[in-house]
Amino acid sequence: MNRRRVAITGLGLVSPYGGDPADFFQRLCAGESAVRHLLTDDVPRPLSMPFVSCPDFDPDAALGKPLASMMDRFAQLGMAAAFAAWDDAGLARHEEGNKRDRWGCAWGTALGGTLAYEKGYRELWQKGRERLSPLAVVLGMNNAANAHISIQLGLGGVSMSHTVACASSSIAIGEAFRRVRSGEATIMVTGGSDVPQAYGVARAWEALRVLAPGDADSAPRACRPFSADRRGLVLGEGGAALILEDWDHALARGARIHGEIVGYGSSCDHSHLVKPDAAGQVRALRDTLDDAGLDSSDIDYVNAHGTATAEGDPVEIAALKAVFGDAAGRLAVSATKSMHGHLLGAAGAIEAIATVLALREQRLPPTAHLTELDPACAGVDHVTVARQQPLRAALSNSFAFGGSNAVLAFRAVGS
């Protein structure tokens, strides 16, 4: 099978740090936490928890009011991130003819338009209204983001939505990568977006007992992956997008190449709905290395799934040690969720961007707030302070409820 090389030519995001990928990465390397204390009174019972939001995002300014009004916030974040990545790639917003029939979109979201649905439920059950807005369905549907992206950018190729819990955007990126590598697509817009701020969603996560507690003073340090005193994950909103492009096509148009995506593997633990299993993660890791044609010795860094849950962190480290064996001790590992939070369906995409930038800048972002390592998470080189280091290739892990695992492999340009 003829495999095309796949370049990453565009990066875009809407994050708690703003929309500049370089600034986002610099602040990660500085160990700057975006976690804040969320206190919401306009709900049946006050909601209080650490949370990561994008307070500076103005959808009307980013998209224009007419377009923004057609979208739930998750789609607004996705569309803005996709626009930013598109512009970063130096691509024209509109183009005549059918040149984009082999250009497509693959998008991830765990929740879709839950804010829109919750608003509808409140209007029906609390306010006693008999009818909802005629836009209710299209605001809430999970494929709203990729549909709007395809329409606005004139993408005539495949348009896919992936909903696989916390692995949603990593799987979207992986499937987009396969399309370009096989020659089915020339360019794919891919990534993910999510907004877990709906009251019912937040209460549901709270009931799982996996959220980190924290008041206003302790919130910035609430997420502590691999730490002996970790107490759970921190939810967040955001959107992140990458432009994947046929390598020769990118070179022919003189595009800047941020990095190269070289492998993708996925698996299912097939053992438990919410409890992770190292054997399933091992399969995804090994399949990714095989798909990329890389040996474990070629990997210098792993951006871990690292959610700071009691069960998840040790299992992920056990999987890495099983794959990397005696070399695991030199494997640099960090979990950037400690700073930008867990963006659910957008997590894999924002962490993919962090991984690509680590390779591009030859610099490792840290796991913030890791001062006392849990012995059960020992055995790898935990990065606790950002450092310069020669990097050839890296992995980004996403391990989701349902036992769905996805791993992406990236290579630095010139490696």
Image (cartoon, rainbow, N blue to C red):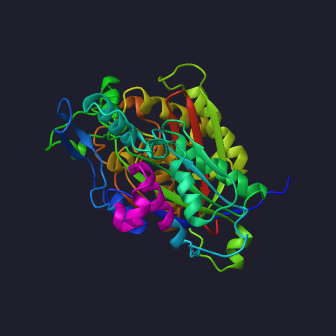
Where residue 211 sits, quadrant-wise, is top left
Residue 66 part of the magenta-drawn span: yes
Instruction: Point out residue 273 in the picture as x, y percentages from the top left corner.
Output: 51, 22
Residue 358 part of the magenta-drawn span: no
Of residues 17 and 299, the one drawn nearer to the viewer in this rendering: 17
> Which residue is farthest right?
1
- Magenta region: which residues? 59-84
Instruction: Point out residue 347 in the picture as x, y percentages from the top left corner.
Output: 45, 46
How many numbered dots are placed on residues in this image?
0
Instruction: Point out residue 195 in the picture as x, y percentages from the top left corner.
Output: 38, 45
Instruction: Point out residue 143 in the picture as x, y percentages from the top left corner.
Output: 55, 46
In the picture, which quadrant includes the C terminus?
bottom right
Of residues 194 and 316, the one drawn nearer to the viewer in this rendering: 194
Residue 207 visible from this viewpoint: yes
> Which residue is farthest top?
271
Q: Main secondary structure of the magenta part?
A: helix
Of residues 391 and 399, the one drawn nearer to the viewer in this rendering: 399
Seen in the image, is 288 located left or right of residue 226? right
Where residue 150 sits, quadrant-wise, is bottom right
Residue 383 visible from this viewpoint: no
Residue at 56% across / 68% down in the picture?
A: 258
Residue at 32% across / 62% down in the picture?
A: 58
Residue at 74% across / 57% down in the picture?
A: 181
> Which residue is farthest front?
130
Residue at 54% across / 25% down in the picture?
A: 277
Seen in the image, is 54 located left or right of residue 254? left
